[in-house]
Each structure stands twice: as structure tokens, then as C-alpha cells.
Image: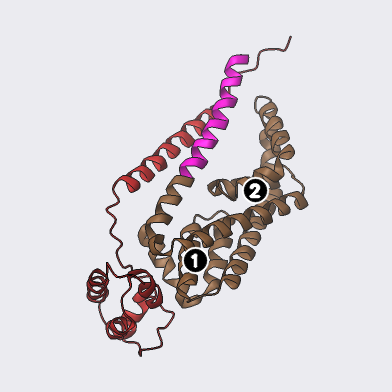
Amino acid sequence: MTPARPPAPLPLRLLFWLCLTLGLAFAGDAAWRILSEDGRRPVEEWMSPRHVMAVFHVPEADLARILGFPPGAPPFASIRDLAQTQGRSMAEVMAELQAAADAHAGDTP
Amino acid sequence: MERLIHELNALIPAHGASVLFAVALLSCAGIPMPTSAMMMAAGAFIAAGDMHMAPVMLATLVGAVIGDQIGYFAGRFGGEPLWQRFHRNARLAPTMDRAQHELDSRALIAVVVSRFPLSALGPWINLASGATRVGWQRFSLGVLIGDGIWILAYVGGGYVFADNVSHLSAKMTSVLAAVAFLGLAMLIGRHLWQRHEDA
């Protein structure tokens, strides 16, 4: 017959409750993200011109005009960096890009 | 968190694959970084033709493996004395012995699974592996396989789902963190229940 084991130490019980709480919090966050998705995909400032062209079907000429790069040579740079190079505000550039993306929302590649 | 992800993603075009090397290294060494979300962004850049797959995968893999080794050796040289100190406590020693035995007998699979899908546990498994003297070769093999799967899944995911990478990465991070913490809670809960039954 094996002797009775002492009760579990307090740190282990605390760790159990911490993991359970964090797990449920992340599960709730994931559920909220899935349920609240409206299908709209905003242009984001980390994206590159080629990424915007591929995902939002915005013509290169429009992007070149908004972001100030020579047509035919979309650089590998973020929208944020291109806006800063132009000395324009992020809000202004993002509004123009979002309008261009919305205008081409139904286009196919 | 999303703000931080956007800021870090914007560094990828400016600095290329070296950003992924640095972020993978830091996150695997235990500093919380949104590496998975950044790998998905890199996958989207690859899909758009801005980057090439091979340098991205290689830089991220090398960074992750170095970060994991830092965690392992931090556990080996910093954690082992701490482990021994707690082990002197008669109440903790049996539990610690069982944990050490469990980790040692399942080291390879534990290391692989803690890279993907339970990547939130990776740095802790690195420290525990070092502190409990899991064999370095077994640990390194697990790290290489696990990190390879992790990087392939996220960079590949970003490549395939390039048109929805922002939404997807935020959801995947939450889902995988939930799986990791609930899985850990289940393991600890099972152990606590067994103790309760035995007592």
C-alpha cells in the first residue's frame, strides 16, 4: 500500500488558475475577433506598394501618384516610410489609399 | 498589441530578413515578440514579390535556433542551481522528480510541440530543458524540427492567405495562446486531481 501523498503545493495550484484564466482570456479574445469581423480589410501602414496592388487591386499608377514613386518601379518600402519621405501626414496618405482600395474593391486580379 | 505588430511589420521592408532573425532570436530567448504575426507579414511580402522565400526562412530559423539555445543554456547555468535549491524542499522534491522524468522521457516531442502549435510555451520548455539537463543533442534536434514546422506554417500561411494576413495573424495568435494555456492548465489540473485522489 502506498502512503498518502501530501496536498499539492500552493505555487502549483496558483499556476493552474493562472493558466486557466489566461487560456480563457485568449479564447474569449479569439472568439470576439471571429464574431466581430465585418469582412472589411483596411489598408495598413506597414504594407508595401506591391502588397497593396496584389491584395486591393489598386492600379500601380494610382499608387505611384499617392506615394510618390516613379511608375514602373514600386519600391520595397512601407507606406509609413514612403509617406515620411514625401513629408506627408500618415492620416492623409492612408485616407487616399483607402479610398483607392475601396474604389477597386470588386476588381479581380 | 496590434499597434506594435504594425510598427514591427513596417521594419521588414526597411531592414529585410534581418528583422525576422532578430525578432525570432528575442522571442525564442524568452522576450515576448509578435514573431508569428511578423512571419505571416513576411509571407505576404513574398507573395507580392517583394522578398524571396529562402532568405526569410533561413534568417528566421537561424534566429530562432540561437534564441532557443540561449534559453537552454540560461536554464543549464542559471536555472539548475535554482532547481537544486527547490529540490531540497522535501515537499517539492517528488513532484520535481516526476516532472524531470516526464520531461526527459518525452523531451523530443515536448520541444517540437512547444515550437508549434504551443509556441507560447517554447521559452519555458527551453529553460526547463536546460535546468533539468535534457540532452543537448535531443533538445537541438527537437528545436530544429519544431522551429522548421513553426516557420513553414506561418510564412507559408502568410504566403497563401496574403490578402487577409492582418486579421488572420491576430486570430491565430489568440487561438494558439488559448490552446497553449488551456493545455497547460489541463496537464496541471490532471496532476492536481491525481494528487487529490491519492491523498
- When the figure is inspected, residue A1 is found, relative to residue B175, above or below; the finding is above
Give the x, y percent position of residue A67: 31, 82
Residue at coordinates 63% horizontally, 58% vertically from top-left? B148
Which chain does the red colour mark? A
Prevailing secondary structure of the magenta residues: helix
Q: How is the image coloured?
A: by chain
Quick check: is B186 in the magenta stretch? Answer: yes
Q: Can residue B113 be seen in this view?
A: yes
In the picture, residue B60 is in which quadrant? bottom right
Q: Earlier in the sequence, mark 1 or mark 2?
A: 1
SS at mark 2 in the image: helix
Which chain does the brown colour mark? B
Q: Closest to the observer: B100 or B90?
A: B100
Query: Which quarter of the figure is the N terminus of chain B placed in?
Result: bottom left
- When the figure is inspected, residue B42 is found, relative to residue B188, above or below; the finding is below
Q: Is B53 on the left-hand or right-hand side of A69? A: right
Give the x, y percent position of residue B27: 54, 57
Query: Which quarter of the figure is the C terminus of chain B placed in?
Result: top right
Please tell me the numbered disc located at residue B112: 2
Part of the protein shown in magenta: B177-199
Residue at coordinates 39% horizontally, 67% vertically from top-left? B7
Q: What residue type is labelled 2?
A: Val
What chain does badge 2 belong to?
B
Q: Closest to the observer: A105 or A75?
A: A105
Please tell me the numbered disc located at residue B165: none
In the picture, residue A55 is in which quadrant? bottom left
Q: Which amino acid does label 1 sit on?
A: Gly
- When the figure is inspected, residue B104 is found, relative to residue A54, above or below; the finding is above
Residue that numbered label 1 is attached to? B43
Give the x, y percent position of residue B40: 47, 62
What chain does badge 1 belong to?
B
